[in-house]
Image (cartoon, grey):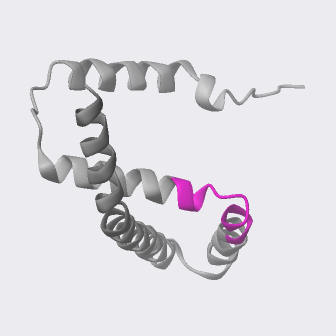
Amino acid sequence: MFVIKSYRYNNPIVILAAFSLFMFFRNLNIRNNIYINKISKTVLAAYLIHEHYMIRPLLAEYVSTIHCSYSLTNETIVYICLAILILAIAFIIEQIRNILFTPIYSIINKSTKQQI
């Protein structure tokens, strides 16, 4: 009996791709780009939202329903819309977090500068 072993994240191709991306970004000179910083915060928030233990099963059930109900073209469109929706929610949450915590950060910065 022939068994195919799934490597998932241990797959040599995935490791090679990750290493290649790391090498590409290592030599890229971006500096301190405000847009890249905002997008990276939003992507982190989206990751934390969709990997939450209460959200992940709901998304898995929704994706299964989509997969069984739609054609490939419509399924792809729904997945793209779902990804955009999650990123939009993450962006809104990140903006609210930024508004709420900016005064706290400034107070912390002032107090640490006075101690030095």
Judged left or right of residue 103, residue 53 is right
Comparing 93 with 113, the one in front is 113
**Residue placed furthest toward the right:** 1
**Relative to 34, does residue 12 appear above or below in the rendering?**
above
Where residue 115 sits: x, y (%)? 29, 30
Residue bounds of the magenta highlight: 48-58
Position above or below: 24 against 111: above
Horizontal side of residue 62 vs 34, given as left or right: right
What is the chief secondary structure element of the magenta stretch?
Answer: helix
- Image x and y of residue 10, in percent: 62, 22
Q: Is residue 90 magenta?
A: no
Q: Is residue 12 left or right of residue 88?
A: right
Is residue 57 magenta-colored?
A: yes
- Nearer the observer, 79 or 89: 89
**Residue under the point 15% across and 53% down:** 35
Residue 98: x, y in percent? 32, 63
Which residue reaches farthest front?
A: 114
Q: Residue at x 26, y 52 (%)?
A: 106
Q: Is residue 16 above or below residue 112?
A: above
Q: Nearer the viewer, residue 104 or 58?
A: 104
x 30%, y 61%: residue:
103
Q: How many marks?
A: 0
Quarter of the picture containing the C terminus is top left
- Left or right: 50 with respect to 96? right
Which of the 4 quarters of the picture holds residue 30? top left
For image coordinates 31% across by 68% down, the residue present is 99
Whole-percent x, y for residue 36 in the image: 20, 48
